[in-house]
Image (cartoon, rainbow, N blue to C red):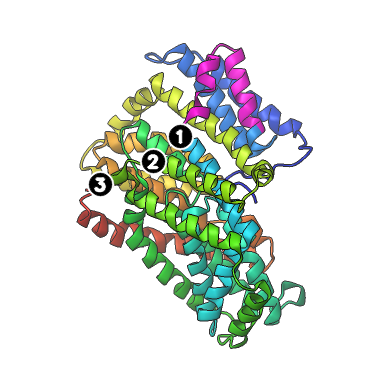
Amino acid sequence: MAAVEAPQTVGRTPRVDAARLAVVVLVGAAIWLVPEPAGVQPRAWHLLAVFVAMMVGIVLRPLPMGAVAFVATAFAVLSGTLTIAEATAGFGNTVVWLVVAAFFIATAFVKTGLGTRIAYHFMRVLGKRSLGLAYGFIAADLVLAPAIPSNTARAGGVLYPVLRSLCVSLGSDVELGTERRIAAFLTFTAYQGVVVTSAMFLTAMAANPLVAELAGQQGVELSWPLWALAASVPGVLSLLLVPALIYRLYPPQITSTPTAPELARQRLAELGAMKRDEWILLAVFVCLLSLWILGGTLGISATTTALAGVAAMLATGALAWSDLLEERNGWDTLIWFAVLVMMASQLGELGLLAWFTDQVSGVLATGHWLPAFLSLSLIYFYVHYFFASNTAHVSAMYAPFLALALAVGTPPVLAALVLAFFSNLFASLTHYGTAAAPILFGSGNVDIGTWWRLGALISLVHIAIWLGAGSLWWRLLGLW
């Protein structure tokens, strides 16, 4: 299972791209050697140089993401920019451990086969027509999203194998030149569904808890229930309208699929009755959702809930300790996520974010907050064309854009949530927009021109839904 937003697989013997590494070093050195501006501490400016170099390294990938973060941390300590206590502070952050625990829960869904079983059940119920099949895959992803913080795991580990098996059985295969029969439509629609479900829950994508942490550092609290409630109406509207739009603009050649429910029944028969471990995981899943929703009232944090869920599966044998040790991308995420949280926190504590806000906010704060915030939001959304990772985009741009939004007078929770939702929805644009994209695009079912053209159009639909109907819903919730 690949990490959600780690833009590369954790390999056994990763190769170093010397040319790209040289670019990373030159970028960092260029900033380091420039005298710090007035009002900025030298240590803050040097940390900015390390942080920017790390972001460039995450984008260019001369090393795996975890390795880039590890090297950046070591340099920050050796250069005296950070103390060892400051550099390792991120590993004690509760949000970091929420993400790691959620990866272990995702491992259980793949290991037990419960995720695949859920997908086949939706296919059995909704699969008589092509559009129904698309909604079936999206419904399965929606059910899995709250507990699996990896859209890569959901798309690549659960949905795509089922989708491919179905398409081959229907005679739609890129190797036969028949992908337009139904495979192209289902592939693209399933991806767009994953993008939306990733935006709907705090625990649906690894960068979401990072968003919550960055917002918290600026005094804006984003809890699991608040995130889910705010995203519910625009999220459901997107999940209902976008597949229908794709069906109209990029229709499959076959619209009736009477054999799909029978295939699902056959696959379910092969899986047999639910096993003991699946029942345990289902019970844990229900408890997790309940406590994430009610945790604020009960005084139980989201991280405590996730750790308790993992402990329950270990104690019952649904997960073995070796399963956790083998979850390499979960441990990889622990490294780079802890470093990103630590760096962002230190940049704030050293006053660099406040200095940046003071420098830029005066240009934007010339009238009502709404036009300025809309401009910031759209820039934040469409600059994702230059990113191949949600995490890299969030790490580099969420905090400063939120600071600017607050500086021009945007209601704090509204600003934090809109940028949080856009931190997922902007992945709809390209075939590399998030780690799940290369898996589905790599099937060859959808050509790159179609992907980009439809992605650009659907991005406008997302923006209209989330800023239109969404803003009315948020108004009713009292968020602005």
Classed neighbour count for the residue bearing mark 3: other residues with Cα under 10 Å, few (<14), some (14–19), many (≥20): some
Q: Pick whichever, 413 or 139, lies toward us.
A: 139
Please, what secondary structure does the residue beneath circle 2 have? Answer: loop
Q: Which residue is mark 1?
A: 94
Mark-to-mark CA distance, 2 and 1:
9 Å
Q: Main secondary structure of the magenta part?
A: helix
Classed neighbour count for the residue bearing mark 1: other residues with Cα under 10 Å, few (<14), some (14–19), many (≥20): some
Q: Which residue is mark 3?
A: 370
Numbered tag placed on residue 166 in the rendering = none
Residue type at mark 1 is Thr
In the rendered view, tell whether residue 86 sits above or below residue 449: above
Classed neighbour count for the residue bearing mark 2: other residues with Cα under 10 Å, few (<14), some (14–19), many (≥20): some
In the rendered view, tell whether residue 58 sits above or below residue 114: above
Q: Position of residue 176 (x, y in %)?
A: 76, 77
Q: Nearer the viewer, mark 2 or mark 3?
A: 2
Q: Which residues are magenta?
A: 67-93
Q: Pick whichever, 466 or 231, lies toward us.
A: 231
Which numbered disc flags the more N-terminal residue, 2 or 3?
2
Q: Are marks 2 and 1 in contact (CB under 8 Å)?
A: yes
Residue type at mark 2 is Ser
Please, what secondary structure does the residue beneath circle 1 have? Answer: helix
Q: Position of residue 202 (x, y in %)?
A: 42, 48
Residue occupying the point 71% across, 77% down: 168
Q: Nearer the viewer, mark 1 or mark 3?
A: 1
Please, what secondary structure does the residue beneath circle 3 have? Answer: helix
Residue 265 shows in this picture: yes
Mark-to-mark CA distance, 2 and 3:
34 Å
Q: Which residue is mark 2?
A: 301
Which numbered disc flags the more N-terminal residue, 2 or 1?
1
In the image: residue 242, left or right of residue 15: left
Residue type at mark 3 is Leu
Q: Position of residue 235 (x, y in %)?
A: 39, 61
